[in-house]
Amino acid sequence: MTSLTVSGRVAQVLSSYVSDVFGVMGNGNVYFLDAAEKQGIRFSPVRHEGAAIAAADAYYRTSGRLAAGTTTYGPGYTNALTALAEAVQAQIPVVLVTGDAPSSGARPWDVDQAAIAAGLGAATFTVTRDAAGAISRQAVEYALTRRTAVVLAIPYDLAALEAPEEDLPEQSAAKVTDDVDGGLGQVARLLAGAKRPLILAGRGAHLAGAGPELRELADRLGALTAGTALALNLLQGEGYLGVAGGFGTDTAAELMGEADVVLVAGASMSPFTMRFGHLLGPDSTVIQIDAGLEATNPRVDVFVSADAKTAAAHILQLLDGGTSAEGWRAEARRRLTSGPGHHPGTDETPDGRLDPRALATALDAVLPERRTVVQDGGHFIGWAPMYWNIPRPQDLVMVGTAFQSIGLGLASAVGAARAVEDGRTLVLASGDGGFLMGLSDLESLIGSAKSAIVVIYNDAAYGAEIHQYGSQGLTEKPMLIPEVDFSGIARALGAESAIIRSLADLSALTDWIDAGAKGTFVADCRITPSVRAPWLSEWMEASQAANAAVAG
């Protein structure tokens, strides 16, 4: 049997879980990358270490399959921290394989990487020469079962040493916690007696594969359905209201507020989803089913710790015959048809730049139907889920929302591009500020993507700050960005591109799509900063109310 080094043993174990690794080569991981190639793991190079974990994170969100990121020790490791924190906060399983200080002791330039990771909420698994394989498997299993990011550290002095053979335990299947007997009978009774039931699904329901069961349950009850932004269209069908929260329409929100019994499956009930406490009516009974151990919002009246798919199937069995609230659905159809939808935008703006709402509407008609959308953080974040058709929940990858960061979009697009099936086009939506933060990885995306479209909402500013703080009279100078010709940068790196100053300019993108949509196209869209997104207005009002309450 061929002997393996410590790095080889790590790569051998990882190869049974992952097919892709993203990263930047350095002293601390060069032996691991060599071993990974021998194990048949595909390496996608990125140009900034922060992109290593962001790409692996987006790969999982898009495909449901684990991927790894890799960096060297020290500055390579610290460069990856924002993306690592985002993965932890968003509960995304991902493995960061990194170099670390020698086992014999830290060098003058080493930092306590395990302590740094602990501060972010990430566990560190440091391999030893005798148990490199076992510790690697422990790290991966921890990431998968806990749905979190982990650090797998290889001490520098061990990386190239020969590792002894190990008898590794079998891979363990993810355990499902079910409180079927402890609460679902009560849930079934509440739903059966509801006159205006609502089922709200989140990413946890999507990951559990609970869509068909929840959809059947909704049809049995005559319930209205909705999804969080990360479970968009999971429950699409009769009675579907769209996305819950600030990205939804006011008409849909009014209907949700009138529900008498609300079943929340696999959703954390974040302030954004709950419209800062205003989504549901004060008299509604709220049931939460989640794989966690406790309710995540004080509005929850009944909590059941269970896998969403298993729980929904059991509720269907408990329902005595068909229960219907079809009048509730008929009322919803009438109001959704007659009520206002999202604002279509205008043809004229004070500065002559594009209205982002009109641009988003036009882009939806232009972009290929088979699309997977990656969304960076920023003021523009709602335009895609509000105005674009997102076919499946996994086709909307919203990065930065958990950690409130911007700048991870390009890196995430690299991972999503590696994960999408042939025939789908990767679409990245980014602001100019976030795009500049991750600019080095535009080259990575161009090298990785078979078909990608980059839409830059370029308002020459940090738009969210303009609306939140510029509107209060604070100086806007630090909030402004000089106009950048992203189209020129994209062409220099090998992409097709165009500056979009009018909707007619989208013809360049249409021509590229009609020619086969091969490679990468960058649309530098010059939008006005004068339009404030409704979700941001809602957030600002909630913040002002909270500040007033504290001051009072």
Image (cartoon, rainbow, N blue to C red):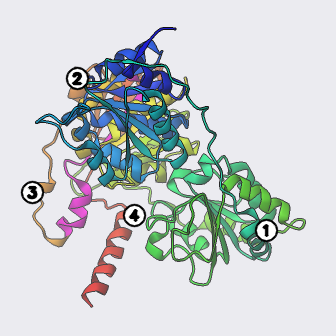
Q: Is residue 202 left or right of residue 311?
A: left
Does 466 lie within the magenta span? Answer: yes
The location of residue 186, given as percent across then percent down, is 75, 74
Does 198 lie within the magenta span? Answer: no
Distance from Cα at disc 2 to Cα at disc 4: 45 Å
Distance from Cα at disc 3 to Cα at disc 2: 41 Å
| Vertical comparison of 286 with 385: above or below | below
Q: Earlier in the sequence, mark 1 or mark 3?
A: 1
Q: Which mark is residue 27?
A: 2
In the picture, the quarter occupied by the C terminus is bottom left
Q: What's the magenta region?
A: 448-471
Which is nearer the eye, 462 or 524? 462
The location of residue 242, given as percent across then percent down, is 58, 58
State the residue position of label 3: 477
Which residue, as the protein is rendered here, is positioned at the far bottom? Answer: 552
Q: Is residue 76 left or right of residue 191?
A: left
Q: Residue at x 15, y 55 (%)?
A: 479
Which residue, as the protein is rendered here, is positioned at the far right? Answer: 321
Q: Secondary structure at mark 2?
A: loop
The location of residue 29, given as percent across then percent down, is 30, 24
| Vertical comparison of 314 with 95: above or below | below
